[in-house]
Amino acid sequence: MPVINRIADFAQEMTEWRRDLHAHPELGLEEHRTSDVVAEKLKSWGIEVTRGIAKTGLVGTLRAGTSNRSIGLRADMDALPMQESNDFPHRSQNDGAMHACGHDGHTTMLLGAAKYLSETRNFDGVVHFIFQPAEEGLGGGKIMVDEGLFDRFPCDAVYGAHNETTLPVGQMVAVAGGVSAASDRFWITITGRGGHAARPHRSIDPVVVGAHVVLALQSLVSRRLDPLDSAVLSITQFHAGSAGNVIPDEAVLNGTVRTLKPDVQDAMESMMKSVVEATAAAHGATAVLDYRRGYPPVVNAPEPTERAARAAARVLGDGKVIRQRPPGMGGEDFSFMALRVPGCFVRIGQAAGARGSVPVHNVRYDFNDDILPIGASFWSTLVEQELARGE
Ligand SMILES: [Zn+2]
Ligand SMILES: [Zn+2]
């Protein structure tokens, strides 16, 4: 693999860092140990560290030469509230938390670049290594921006990366324009009237109403939206009842909506409200939709995307960088950074047969350590290219 030789030399060390992080996953805004580990490594390489941005977030700043040009590189650090099913030695030691999205690998790749760049300093300008908490739902990226990230650490451009389990090792994606979806959440509270399960006519059963609501909502995308528009509506939780012979008073459903266009996002919210309320009313119940807008879509700016693609091609070779493809329906809070500073979010392939191809957010997922040197080389090459000396 044409990665930077010096980085290939410490690939084993990076694997150890990554597996240590994997074994000690921490949920959003609680990444205390992770933040300590990152800060300690950055300091040991002589990198200036600023902590406590978005609670557990931190920024490492490395300067070389005299130029004021600056670049921001972002990694996320949080794990998911899941129970890991893997049984390898570095499996999660924290019950109910798992690095099932590879943020342990993202953190490690950026640390690898920080180590290399602090040793070589073959650039002229300022690099900000941004380690953010809470990507998975709590919007750590937004909190960092709101707490003045780019005022305190001005960046000419900002870049982020995510592993991809359907893309082979040795390939990357750098696509201009929209690459992720708007990611919203909703809660539906259905209120009926509880009672004895043997006398349903004296109750209003919120479980049956909830079942109708689930099915009615599944017709919105298939029957109400323009087929050429994209949306996802997934109901992921349905909570009601506590006994086999009791009709409960209430049922609570929740889930997520993903859309690519603002008008489709507006339409989904208003159609959901009317379907939820009217379906409940048709059964004599009431229902309230609490719809909360989450992450906006990540929109990659043309110039940073061009530069990221160039750096990726230097590491992986021409023809290994995908430059055009449709957006995915996942959400990413890198969007909040890319809304403030021109940015690009790239994907790094990690599939090699069965290795690295278990989907993210699966209980058997693991980050593929083989791509640690690729990611670290990509970040380092991007810095040496963008902050090239003698310009
Ligand atoms: Zn994720
Ligand atoms: Zn992720």
Image (cartoon, helix red, strand yellow):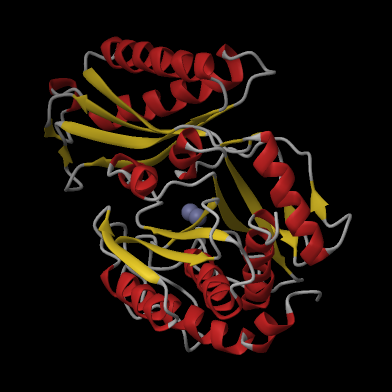
Q: Is residue 49 above or below residue 215?
A: below
Task: Determine which quarter of the picture holds residue 382.
Answer: bottom right
Instruction: Tell me, yes or no, if residue 165 can be seen here.
Output: no
Query: Closest to the observer: 25 or 308?
Result: 308
Q: Quadrant of the N terminus?
A: bottom right
Q: Is residue 19 left or right of residue 325?
A: left
Residue drawn where x is 31% and y is 63% of the image: 50
Q: Quadrant of the C terminus?
A: bottom right
Task: Determine which quarter of the picture holds residue 384.
Answer: bottom right
Q: Is residue 273 left or right of residue 313?
A: left
Q: Is residue 301 above or below residue 99?
A: above
Q: Position of residue 147 (x, y in %)?
A: 27, 44
Q: Position of residue 67 (x, y in %)?
A: 55, 55
Residue drawn where x is 31% and y is 10% of the image: 282
Query: Closest to the observer: 156 or 250?
Result: 156
Q: Is residue 114 left or right of residue 352?
A: left
Q: Position of residue 258 (x, y in %)?
A: 50, 32
Farthest residue in the right direction? Answer: 319
Q: Position of residue 199 (x, y in %)?
A: 15, 29
Q: Is residue 219 above or below residue 173?
A: above
Q: Is residue 179 above or below residue 230?
A: below
Residue drawn where x is 24% and y is 57% of the image: 55
Instruction: Tell me, yes or no, if residue 380 can be seen here.
Output: yes
